[in-house]
Amino acid sequence: MAVRDEFPLLAAAELDEVITHSHVRDIALRSGRTMALITLDNGRDHTRPSTLGPATLFELGDTLEAQRDRAAKGEIDAIAVTGKPYFLAAGVDLSNVADIPDRATAAELPRLGHRVLGLLHQAPVPTFVFINGLALGGGLEIGLNADYRTINAAAPAVGLPEVFLGLVPGWGGATILPNLIGIERALKVVIENPLKQNRVLKPAEALELGIADAMFVPATFLESSIRWADEVLGGKKVDRPHVPGAIERAVKWPIAVRIARETVEKKLGTVPQSPYRALDLLELARKNDRSLGFAAEDDAIAELSGGDQFAASIYAFNLVQKRAKRPAGAPDKALAKPVTKVGIIGAGLMASQFALLFVRRLQVPVVITDLDQARVDTAVAGIRREITTLVGKGRISDDEGKRLTALISGTVDKADFADCDWVIEAVFEELGVKQQVFAEVEPHLSETAVMATNTSSLSVEQIGAKLAHPERLVGFHFFNPVAVMPLIEVVNTPATDDATLATAMRVAKDLRKNAVITRDTPGFVVNRVLAKLLGEAMHAVEQGSSFEDVVAAQRAFGFPMDPFVLLDLVGLKVGAHVLDTHHGAFPDRFFESPALHELAAEGVLLEKDGKGEPKGIDKRARKIVAKHRPAGAVALSVDELRLRIEDGLADEIKRMLETQVVEAAEDIDLCMILGAGWPFHMGGITPYLDRVGASERVFGGTFHDPRVAGPKA
């Protein structure tokens, strides 16, 4: 019986799936044995990863069944699976999940995955998976179900991102992995990494963790893997030092899961469901019973995939995977100017981060300038130390490190910027200072050079008001830390020409960032929304609400940190400046905060432990805020605060759309996801405001069609 006959609902579903085919060929091994090698290939070019939909799994299942039959007859001695160049598989194609007609059909998918991939574990001969490229989610679980795994040293990403997407590893990952590498390492892969903005593993990490048994260089990866497999078939011992023993199962395992659960609750609260379901599965995996664990995975996937949070995650996933790659309002790409040298004005921490990012991604000369040579020399030395550190960690080769080091230079002579095609400032957030540095450098630039400002809240148009060529100025707002945060807000002023805007979009892409074009308005998108949240938080405590109630009121939004931790992170002086800017622009809707100015002057807000981690609000901060409480102030309850913030956000975002700060609500959602850490499982800030009724309360409508799903508050 064909595998598809066991899953009639999925077999009958009409899904627009790009099928990944299973191509089989026999490999004659040096030992005289025969290996059946299955190559997964979706027939697309090397930019489209192979994915695992129902039709793909049906075909793979039938292929594996056929090879198992051959093995039982003694025709082959091993079964191996690998992928087309650069990809093993990227898991389920999430873009098609919304087309699954009902929950009963969706419930067949995890069972189908277990049925098919389980054939590797149940084969009568040893099974191997050669992880030749990207292996995420179900792609990695193909390997976990096999007996042995090798990995390509150049594979770009390995991981189990399901928790980030509102799901759990559902094809054996939550059950097999902890029994392969131990509970603490499995917690890192299944829980910790996905919750750190979906961090993935590099091949060397996968090897060290014990996910892979051997690693080989790209040039000879397949040949080396086949030769290694032949050695294993011949009796070569495969050492797996991290397989948990009796003491770990009895003592360390439950403690590690409990600590992880407490950590998740402390950081995320109890709104997200997937981390807790994943922890339940990891706890159950201690019994090392695959049938029990797989059944629990099936139940968890069936529940989560039909729930609000997964639907919201799919909305967010589509924003990041589709809309981010086709930025709204972007001019013709052909207008972009080439960038062969970068100039950076400033030699502080942000400027140094820029320099390292630009030189690594663009591989062009980067020159830094500042007021005096000592500051410049210090910055250049620091950047070169960072490059040396990257070499030491194996992130880049020694040769690349030497090449990048040679591309970094510093100067105090603005004439050295004459051949720069792209010049970006990273100086103090003050209008006059930014105007002055551009006025000093513009006369030395070529007539085609683009000037970019990293301002977070000032008017880009005003920054360029004294320029001879304001059409060549664009806002280019990074988020901190520069190397990690994936968003750049590209600010288009009335004067900015299309060639400049196109160049900015091209540079953002080359930096491997997602760019959203915004109008030149205070705070652009992310800081305007955050200014609303932070302003409401400070106003509430000044009016008598407790810090704890304000944190509780904003917890429903699911942000990775509470408003006061965020204020401490961005800096109290910066936070006060941002609130002042927005109050000055929109005094009827944004609060100023005299208490925050005093907190900034005193440098006090959070009490921290010995590791610098926040423990709570400092007593001195409570006293300072209390001093600014007006007579007759009335504290609001947690629910009243939450409603006030929700309604204020709905009103502000509606105004942003009416004034065309961005083209659509989806762009605001994308900015908040990529620039402010709005959680995937919440979908986006505008669907959230629709779901909780804020949109209806404020303007009698919604930002989206009511069918845009997501988690309830």
Image (spheres, grey):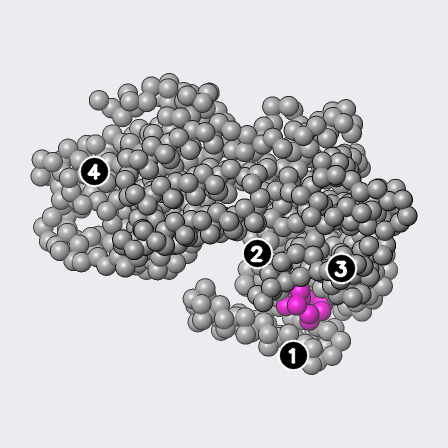
The answer for how far apart the CA atoms under marks 3 and 4 are is 62 Å
Q: Quadrant of residue 672?
A: top right
Q: Is residue 294 visible?
A: yes
Which residue is labeled 3 in the image? 621
Q: Residue at x 11, y 36 (%)?
A: 72
Which residue is labeled 1 in the image? 377
Q: Quadrant of residue 241?
A: bottom left
For residue 480, side relative to residue 263 (left or right): right
Residues tagged 4 and 2 counted as in contact (Cβ below 8 A)? no
- Which circle's residue, 2 or 3, is located before the other in the chain? 2
**Magenta highlight range:** 340-352
* 12 up-or-down from 413: above or below: above
- Which circle's residue, 4 or 2, is located before the other in the chain? 4
* 533 up-or-down from 611: above or below: above
Which residue is labeled 2 in the image? 484
Q: Residue at x 76, y 57 (%)?
A: 622
- Which circle's residue, 1 or 4, is located before the other in the chain? 4
Q: Between residues 627 and 539, which one lies in front from this camera angle?
A: 627
The x and y percentages for residue 275 are 48, 42
Residues tagged 3 and 4 counted as in contact (Cβ below 8 A)? no
For residue 137, side relative to residue 640 (left or right): left
